[in-house]
Each structure stands twice: as structure tokens, then as C-alpha cells.
Image (cartoon, rainbow, N blue to C red):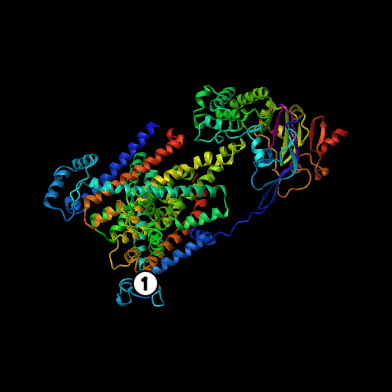
């Protein structure tokens, strides 16, 4: 039997993308995510109107040629507000998840690789943070400090750290026992080096999957807090505040609610599909790499 | 009348590569009150054979030809419900891995009583029966141990429990699929001894699969040697092991660590590997690895009798008999 | 078994202590004096004095925390800034509404989720399985409050099938049930998919294990094998997930109560924040944390009951 090998893809990322694109779910997710990111990035050029420009005579219109998603109670173009709202969503999601990954990695690797007492301490810290129902905790902090975008970012980041930390910890623990680590240790590699060079790359894959699946949650949380009036302050457009307006005007027009919900639903579907497809790509590779 | 009479059984699996002919024209008989062993290396079809007998086959498997007669009745024609009726009552099984055989979150007692669900006995009577069986296989303090969970028993004890469960309904046929392979040598000896005693007591037949030749020689009355889905030799243990008629059997005996007389650094092996069961080369299935192959081997040999009751599928026998 | 329960409750207590202490510390870390933080701008001088005594602000931090706990254990969470009623009483009045909503939601979604998961596992790759799979993946993370708003819009405002406001008349079970439908739909919808996928994966794994083959070899009926033997094992991760999920459900309940104007902890918190009634806010957060810790502890204990290996520490 002849040995047939696939042509070697150029890079790790290239290989991941290659597999992702061949999965219909993954492709759909990727397309949606790219659309969302692009529209947020290029908001000033894509949005047909200024999102905070008032136009009261044209208030509360339904969708039309001039206004794709209608207008809100102050005549602002809903579609533009949706586009710009994507920016806010990302402005919250990226630092939040970035920070959570950073601290989660740090604490998780220390917990997984370090001495048992430190591990126990960190796990206790994680469990304590996790014991607060997230929204309640966020509300408590907002109550004390006052609503603002930064508060939301910090709160969601802190409550997300255990999610990433626990995964990193479990992976580190299993990798710790892997043969190639023992080999490196016997060659005299120091702990920080082992952690940075060997454990870190193996952990990034699952973390990416986790992050992809987490983005809808974080975005949803920000939207929820803004909906409650605890997040972004008007007139900054946020999907959550759009929904809040829609809720207050629910008997006048359904379009604000519909418009506010669509981006959230799309974000959920896009990132979840992407995350699932990523997981299918990353998992078998991880199993082959050095874990048991 | 034989307990189990298999004639010309052929079973295939539908795979993406094509039809995998796992069993081809397999025939064997398990007489009443006898222990018949099946010997063969991985891939010889033992698992497929068992799954065909009790009809718990994979979804892509099908019986291409042949009969399986159990006490004179055709098994293959029976409905699924009828088969289910036989399992655990007339035909029982003991599996290879004792650590995986029992449900980990239910007590041993509960599991032993569950399998009696068809019997119209009170709970107390079922419990008593279970206790007696446990005692019979040598589990101390059986009454108390019924309330324990499988993880509280060692591997050897779990296998004994498995045997107890299999024999509880006094089946006509016990199929043991490599029951001692996962146990160490001393345990193996004990379990084999116990199995023999129980078989004598209960009077059932046993189909004993193993690749451990010593155990087969010790326990079985007759033996069937399988290779790559075919029966290549069958007969009494004495005939087959003392005067093996097929080159494969001879090679197997030579390679068995138990048989090696002189000190050697390298254990002998049979060179080569089993043929591709999807695209089978024609002729004798062992020809590619046989030290004695010759021109006639391009044709599939029919089973020949080297002596009464001792058959093997090899052209050389005809030649020997004639000579 | 008992020792396991004690150990687990002990752990829960430790975590509760830590969580409450964290809240306490956060209050103190806010710039400004803690009394203003806790009471807000509407505090009268008498209230400030009373709180200062209660909190023992001149004493070292450790003593303050100790006092706080002592009070908490006595059920004293302070006084409402406006009505001067005990916070504990105000909060406890609202807890049953939230608990009803949450328990109702998790019950229907768990039952449906487990049923769908079992069906999918036993009938792998059937139309039902694939449909459930796709729906689960897409619906899982849509935020509960979006579902709440949409269902409010469609079923309450437009179609008028269900009420849009409140929890229903006290004492009238039917009416209360009617009011529960949409809110619990919003909360439970994402959970159905999640649980179904979890149960499916679990069941598939368990059904491939050796002991299931044994059970079949002994002729046990398929129904008994699927439910009594396979599901019994496969359900364990789901129990844990449900226990942890209560935290998410509590969060979702906050939004849902606002959207449907239902009484409960969520509405209490939001109203209190708006009116700067900080003691009530703190009391509500504390209580919801307690509920959450209790549910995870309960889930672990249930798991230990179902799986003897956990009790034995294996």
C-alpha cells in the first residue's frame, strides 16, 4: 500500500484555516465573524448616518429605503446605531477577554505546574469568584462605583478569569506529566522556559476555542448591563441600550427590539459555529501532540 | 445432540474500502458437556464468531451464509426478541476485561438480581441464589459482598463474579472470551480450576477463546484453530497439540513461550502478517507465511482428516495420508 | 456518605465566607468612607451613626469583618435606607418569586434536554438527532434577555397569548403558571440545547463501554439498559452542570424579571440601585450568592449519592 500524504500546509494558522473552511459550519461562522468585525472596524464608512444625529421629525419609522432598520424615538437611524454598536461591543469584548486570558494563563499555569499549596490557593480563588452569579456581582459593583464602560470591562474580566484559568490549569497538569516535558527537564530546562516554550503553545489552541465560545457571552453581558442602564451611557450607541429603548417603546414599534436583537443573535451564531469548528480542528491535534 | 453446531458460517462487514470477509465457511461443533477451545491470533475472527452466535453484531455486519444450530434449533432465523430470551439463560458470556464488565454505580447484588428479571422468584429468593453462586465461585462472605460496588473488588474477584453471573441460570452453553487474559498467571490457574469444577457440576458446555495455549491444553477437551477468518484445524486437544497437522498450528506451538525447551535470546515469531480481509488473495489463506507452501496452495484446501476426529485444511495432509 | 456531606458543606461554608469577605473588602476599597458607600447619599445622620456602630468602624478590619459575619449569621443584614425595615425581611419576601422562576425553568429545560439527549444518543444520526444538534448549537448562547424581549414582543404584545407583566394573582395557581410560561421559556431555552448535547455525548460514551455489552449479553431489555444502566451513569456530568448553571440562571432571572416586570431578586436589585438603596443591593447580592453556593453543593451531594465512587474518594 502506497503512503499518501497531503501536501504540507504552510503554517499552523494556515492548517487551521484550511480545515475550518472545509467545514460548512465553520465556514458560516467565519464569514459571519468577519462581517461583524469588518463592520465594526469600518463603521465610520459603512454607517449611512451619524448614529447620534437627531432627526426628531422622522422618529419611530419602520424600515424603509432611507432607513434600513427604521429610526428610534429621537429620529436617529437605527441601522447606523447597530453598526456603531458593534464597535462598543468589541471595545468591551476584546480587552475583557484579553485580560481574562492573560490572568487566566498566568494563574492557571502557576496552579497547574507549581506546588500543591499554591494550586489549592488559586483554585480557592477561582471558586470564590465563581460563586457570585455574574450579573449580580456586576450590579453590585456598578451600584457602588457608578455605571461606566470601564467598570463593565473590569467586572466582566474578573469574573471570566476562572473560566480560562481552570482550563489552563487542567491542561498544564496533564502536560506536566507528558514525556517531552520530562525529557526537557532532564536536559536542564528551567521552569519558566518550560512553561513559556512548551506548555504555552499547547494551551493556546483550546484557549482560542474557549475565547471564541466566550465572546457571545461577554457581548451578551455587556448588552445586558447596558440594557439595564448600568453600562454604556447615552447617547453612545450600544446594542443593549437599543434594546432598552425598544423595550420602553414596545407598544409603539417592534423594530427597535428586532434591530437590537439581530446583531446579538448573529454574534452568537457566528462565534459559536466558529468555536465549534475550531474545537474539532484543535482537539485531535492536541491529542497527538504530547498529552496522554 | 451437539449443543452448538456451526456449519459453513460466513460473516462480512461493510466497510468504506469494501466488504471485509471476517469469517469464511467456518464449521465447528460444541458437544454436550464438553469444553471446546478456540485458538488464534488477533484478527482471526474469534470476536466476530462470538457476536454472530449471540447475535449482538455490529450494525455493518451481515451473515453471508451458513447455519448456527443451538440444540438442534436454528439461531440465525430467530427474531431479536427470541434471541434476547436465550441470552443469559441458555447461552451466557464471560468477557475479557473484568474491570469493564460491571456497571460501576450499581451494587453487585443489584446487577445479579437484575439478570434474574425473567424468573418468578421473590426478591429474597433471587438474593439467595446470587449469594449461593458467589459462594460457589469462591467469594468469601458473599451475603455482605452483594451490597458492595464493583470497584471494591479486585480484578480476579470481578471475573469470578462475572462467571457466577454467567452460570447462575445454568446455561447450556457458556462462551468465555479470553476470560483470563487480563489476569496474572496464579489467578489464571485458580479461575481455570474453578471453571472446570463448575462445568462438571452444572453440566454445561463451554466455548473457551484464548490465545494462551497452555490454558487451552489444561482446560479444554477439544480445540479449534482459527486463522484470518477460517478454521484451519480442529480436533481433540491431544491430537492437535501433540500431532499438529497444519503448518500454522505447528508454528504457533513452536512460538508458544510455554513450549520452548532450550534457552534462547529471541522468541520465535511467525514472519509476515494476516492477509487483507477485504481483498483476499485466492488459495490457502496461510500460504503467504507458510514455510511449506507449494504450487497446490494456490487452490483453497478442503478440510482433510489426518485421523478420525482430527481435521485440518492443508493440501499436505492428503499427501501424507496417501503416502 | 455522611463524612462526604460534611466535608462538602464545610467547603461551601469556606467559599461563602471568602465570597462575603470579598464583597466586604470591595465596599471598603471604594474611595470615600464605607458608610457613605453603603448607605448612599440619602443617609440621615442617625442612620450613619447606627451603621457606624454596627460596623464598628473604629475597630481593626478583622474585627469589622467578624462583626459583619456575626450580624449575618443572626440574619441581620442591616436596615433599608427608606422604610427602615430589615433588609433580610425585604429580600426574603422576593426570594420565593425568583426561586420559583428558576426552578421551573431548570426543570422543564432539564427534562426536555435529557429526553432529547437520550433520543439523540440512541438514534444517532437520525433526522431528530441532527435537527436537535443544529438547533442546540445555534440557540445555546443567545442571551436570555434577547429571547425574553423577543418573546415578550411576539407572544405577549403582538399575539397577546400570554401576560406581559407580573407573576399572577397570589393563590391562583393557573394564573401564576400562565405568567411563568414566557419568562421560563426565555431562561430555559438555551439550557435545553446545552443539556441535550451534554447528555448525548455522555450517553454515547457510556453506551460504548464494556458493562453495557455485558447487560446486552444477559438479555436485559433495551429500555432497562438505556435508562437503568446507561443514563444512570451518563447523567452525572449533567447534575454538576445544572448545579453550576444555577449561577447563570440567577443572572438570566435578573433580566427576565425586568423584561416581564416580575417581582423577585432581580427587580429588587435594579430598583434598589436606581434609588440608591445600597443595603438592599448588598443583601440581595449576598442572598443570590448563598443560593448559588447552596445549589452547587447540593449538586455535588446528589452526584455522590448517584455515584459511589465519588463517596469513596476514587
Is residue A198 in sight in this rendering? no
Tag 1, which secondary structure? Answer: helix
Q: Indicate the quadrant containing the N terminus of chain C: top left, top right, bottom left or bottom right.
A: top left
Instruction: Find residue B77 and report its image quarter.
Output: top right
Secondary structure of the magenta portion, mostly?
Answer: strand
Residue occupying the far right of the picture? B322
- Lateral position of residue B115 relative to residue B273, left or right: left
A228 within the magenta span: no
For the residue pair C121 and B39, the one nearer the viewer reads as C121
Residue B138 image point, x, y percent: 57, 22
Relative to B144, say whether B319 is above or below.
Answer: below
Towards the viewer: A59 or A10: A59
Residue A16 % position (x, y): 50, 58
Out of B248 and B107, give the one closest to the viewer.
B107
Q: Position of residue C61 (x, y in %)?
A: 19, 43
Name the side, left or right, on which B44 lies relative to C6.
right
Residue depicted at x 62% and y 28%:
B167
Instruction: Name the subunit of mark 1.
Output: A
Q: Is residue C70 visible?
A: yes
**Which residue is denoted by mark 1 in the rendering?**
A80
In the rendered image, which quarter is residue C63 located in?
top left
Query: Is B14 above or below relative to B321?
Result: below
Please state, as top left, top right, bottom left or bottom right, where the C terminus of chain C lies in the image.
Answer: top left
Pinpoint residue B247: horizontal percent, then vertical percent: 76, 36
Segment colored magenta: B23-40
Q: How many marks?
A: 1
Residue at the (54%, 53%) spot, across then down = C129
Amino acid at each position: 500500500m502506497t503512503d499518501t500524504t497531503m501536501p504540507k500546509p504552510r503554517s499552523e494558522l494556515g492548517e487551521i484555516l484550511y480545515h475550518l473552511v472545509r467545514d460548512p459550519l465553520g465556514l458560516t461562522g467565519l464569514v459571519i465573524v468577519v462581517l461583524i468585525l469588518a463592520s465594526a472596524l469600518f463603521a465610520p464608512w459603512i454607517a449611512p448616518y451619524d448614529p447620534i444625529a437627531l432627526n426628531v421629525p422622522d422618529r419611530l419609522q419602520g424600515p424603509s429605503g432611507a432607513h434600513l432598520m427604521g429610526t428610534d424615538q429621537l429620529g436617529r437611524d437605527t441601522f447606523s446605531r447597530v453598526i456603531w454598536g458593534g464597535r462598543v461591543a468589541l471595545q468591551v469584548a476584546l480587552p475583557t477577554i484579553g485580560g481574562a486570558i492573560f490572568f487566566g494563563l498566568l494563574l492557571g499555569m502557576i496552579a497547574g505546574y507549581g506546588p500543591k499549596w499554591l494550586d489549592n490557593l488559586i483554585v480557592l480563588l477561582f471558586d470564590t469568584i465563581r460563586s457570585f452569579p455574574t450579573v449580580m456581582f456586576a450590579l453590585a459593583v456598578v451600584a457602588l462605583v457608578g455605571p461606566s464602560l470601564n467598570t463593565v470591562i473590569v467586572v466582566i474580566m474578573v469574573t471570566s478569569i476562572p473560566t480560562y484559568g481552570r482550563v489552563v490549569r487542567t491542561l498544564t497538569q496533564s502536560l506536566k506529566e507528558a514525556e517531552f516535558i520530562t525529557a526537557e527537564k532532564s536536559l536542564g530546562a528551567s521552569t519558566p522556559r518550560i512553561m513559556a516554550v512548551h506548555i504555552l503553545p499547547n494551551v493556546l489552541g483550546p484557549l482560542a476555542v474557549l475565547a471564541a465560545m466566550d465572546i457571545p457571552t461577554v457581548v451578551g453581558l455587556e448588552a445586558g448591563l447596558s440594557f439595564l442602564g448600568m453600562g454604556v451611557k447615552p447617547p453612545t450607541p450600544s446594542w443593549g441600550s437599543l434594546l432598552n429603548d425598544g423595550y420602553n417603546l414596545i407598544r409603539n414599534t417592534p423594530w427597535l427590539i428586532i434591530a437590537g436583537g439581530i446583531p446579538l443573535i448573529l454574534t452568537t451564531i457566528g462565534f459559536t459555529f466558529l468555536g465549534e469548528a475550531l474545537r474539532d480542528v484543535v482537539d485531535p491535534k492536541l491529542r497527538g501532540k504530547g498529552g496522554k | 445432540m451437539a449443543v452448538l453446531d456451526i456449519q459453513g458460517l460466513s460473516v462480512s462487514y461493510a466497510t468504506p474500502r469494501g466488504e471485509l470477509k471476517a469469517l469464511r465457511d467456518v464449521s465447528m461443533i460444541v458437544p454436550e458437556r464438553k469444553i471446546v477451545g478456540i485458538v488464534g491470533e488477533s484478527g482471526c475472527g474469534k470476536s466476530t464468531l462470538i457476536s454472530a452466535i449471540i447475535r449482538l453484531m455490529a450494525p455493518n455486519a451481515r451473515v453471508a451464509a451458513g447455519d448456527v444450530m443451538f440444540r438442534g434449533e436454528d439461531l440465525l432465523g430467530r427474531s431479536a426478541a427470541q434471541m434476547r430470551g436465550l441470552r443469559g439463560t441458555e447461552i451466557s458470556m464471560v468477557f475479557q476485561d473484568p474491570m469493564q464488565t460491571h456497571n460501576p454505580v450499581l451494587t453487585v447484588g443489584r446487577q445479579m438480581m437484575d439478570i434474574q428479571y425473567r424468573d418468578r422468584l421473590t426478591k429474597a429468593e433471587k438474593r439467595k441464589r446470587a449469594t449461593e453462586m458467589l459462594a460457589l465461585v469462591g467469594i468469601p462472605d458473599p451475603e455482605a459482598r452483594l451490597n458492595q460496588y464493583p470497584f471494591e473488588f479486585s480484578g480476579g474477584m470481578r471475573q469470578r463474579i462475572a462467571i457466577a453471573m454467567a452460570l447462575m441460570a445454568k446455561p447450556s452453553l457458556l462462551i468465555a472470551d479470553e476470560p483470563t487474559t487480563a489476569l496474572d498467571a496464579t489467578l489464571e490457574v485458580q479461575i481455570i480450576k474453578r471453571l472446570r469444577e463448575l462445568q462438571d457440576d452444572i453440566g454445561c458446555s463451554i466455548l473457551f477463546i484464548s490465545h494462551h495455549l497452555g490454558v487451552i491444553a489444561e482446560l479444554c477437551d477439544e480445540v479449534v484453530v482459527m486463522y484470518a477468518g477460517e478454521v484451519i484445524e480442529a480436533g481433540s486437544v491431544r491430537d492437535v497439540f501433540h500431532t499438529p497437522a497444519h503448518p500454522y498450528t505447528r508454528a504457533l506451538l513452536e512460538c508458544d513461550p510455554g513450549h520452548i525447551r532450550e534457552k534462547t535470546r529471541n522468541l520465535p515469531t511467525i514472519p509476515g502478517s494476516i492477509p487483507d480481509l477485504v481483498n483476499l488473495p485466492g488459495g490457502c489463506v496461510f500460504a503467504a507465511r507458510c514455510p511449506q507452501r507449494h504450487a497446490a496452495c494456490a487452490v483453497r484446501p478442503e478440510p482433510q482428516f489426518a485421523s478420525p476426529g482430527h481435521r485440518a485444511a492443508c493440501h499436505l495432509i492428503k499427501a501424507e495420508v496417501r503416502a | 456518605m455522611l463524612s462526604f456531606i460534611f466535608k462538602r458543606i464545610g467547603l461551601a461554608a469556606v467559599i461563602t465566607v471568602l465570597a462575603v469577605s470579598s464583597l466586604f473588602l470591595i465596599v471598603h476599597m471604594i474611595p470615600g468612607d464605607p458608610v457613605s458607600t453603603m448607605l448612599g447619599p440619602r443617609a440621615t445622620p442617625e442612620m450613619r451613626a447606627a451603621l457606624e456602630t454596627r460596623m464598628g468602624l473604629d475597630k481593626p478590619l478583622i474585627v469589622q469583618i467578624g462583626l459583619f459575619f456575626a450580624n449575618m449569621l443572626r440574619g441581620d443584614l442591616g436596615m433599608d435606607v427608606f422604610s427602615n425595615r430589615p433588609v433580610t425581611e425585604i429580600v426574603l419576601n422576593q426570594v420565593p418569586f425568583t426561586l420559583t422562576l428558576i426552578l421551573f425553568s431548570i426543570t422543564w429545560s432539564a427534562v426536555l434536554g435529557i429526553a432529547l439527549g437520550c433520543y439523540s444518543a440512541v438514534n444517532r444520526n437520525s433526522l431528530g438527532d441532527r435537527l436537535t444538534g443544529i438547533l442546540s448549537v445555534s440557540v445555546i448562547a443567545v442571551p436570555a434577555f434577547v429571547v425574553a424581549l423577543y418573546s415578550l414582543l411576539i407572544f405577549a404584545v403582538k399575539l397577546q397569548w400570554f401576560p406581559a407583566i407580573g407573576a399572577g394573582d397570589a393563590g391562583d395557581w393557573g394564573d401564576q403558571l400562565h405568567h411563568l410560561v414566557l419568562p421560563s421559556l426565555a431562561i430555559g431555552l438555551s439550557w435545553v440545547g446545552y443539556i441535550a448535547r451534554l447528555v448525548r455525548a455522555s450517553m454515547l460514551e457510556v453506551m460504548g463501554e464494556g458493562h453495557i455489552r455485558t447487560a446486552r449479553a444477559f438479555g436485559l431489555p433495551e429500555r432497562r439498559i438505556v435508562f437503568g444502566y446507561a443514563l444512570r451513569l451518563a447523567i452525572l456530568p449533567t447534575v454538576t452542570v445544572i448545579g453550576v448553571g444555577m449561577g447563570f440562571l440567577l443572572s438570566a432571572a435578573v433580566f427576565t424579571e425586568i423584561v416581564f416586570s416580575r417581582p423577585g431578586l432581580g427587580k429588587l436589585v435594579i430598583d434598589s440601585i436606581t434609588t440608591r438603596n445600597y443595603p438592599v443591593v448588598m443583601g440581595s447580592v449576598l442572598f443570590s450568592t448563598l443560593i448559588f453556593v447552596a445549589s452547587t453543593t447540593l449538586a455535588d451531594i446528589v452526584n455522590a449519592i448517584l455515584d459511589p465512587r465519588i463517596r469513596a474518594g476514587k
